[in-house]
Image (cartoon, helix red, strand yellow):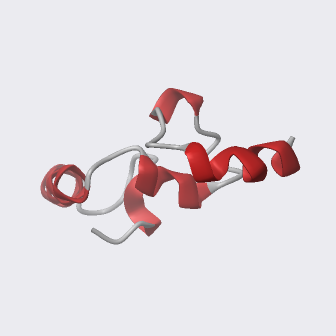
């Protein structure tokens, strides 16, 4: 499956978060949100969950 998806990657425009296996391919999260949206979401997480209590798939993705 990974091989098939890799061949199709050149035709992608983005990704839907509910169709992305971020535990297996965390790099695909960058395609789920525009850079501005990622930065906004990360700011919200920092404000409301500063200790990292909740699972946050965006934690390893830079804005």
Q: Tell me, yes or no, if residue 34 can be seen here.
A: yes
Can residue 56 be spotted in the picture? no
Q: Quadrant of residue 51?
A: bottom left
Q: Quarter of the image for the C terminus: give it.
A: bottom left
Residue 19 left/right relative to 17: right
Q: Residue 21: x percent and y percent?
A: 65, 41
**Residue at 15% across, 51% down:** 44
Instruction: Determine the residue positioned at 66% across, 54% down.
Output: 25
In the picture, measured across the screen, residue 10 lies left or right of residue 53, that is right
Between 14 and 43, the residue placed more toward the observer is 14
Whether residue 34 sits left or right of residue 59 in the image: it is: left
Q: Is residue 44 left or right of residue 28?
A: left
Residue sticking out furthest to the front: 11
Question: Is 5 in front, or is 10?
Answer: 10
Q: Position of residue 59 (x, y in %)?
A: 40, 62
- Location of the N terminus (image quadrant): top right
Name above or below for residue 5 compared with residue 63: above
């Amino acid at each position: 499956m990974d091989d098939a998806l890799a061949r199709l990657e050149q035709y992608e425009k983005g990704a839907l978060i509910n169709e992305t296996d971020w535990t297996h391919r965390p790099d695909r999260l960058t395609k789920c949100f525009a850079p501005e949206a990622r930065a906004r979401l990360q700011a919200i997480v920092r404000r409301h969950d500063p200790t990292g209590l909740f699972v946050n798939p965006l934690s390893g993705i830079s804005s």
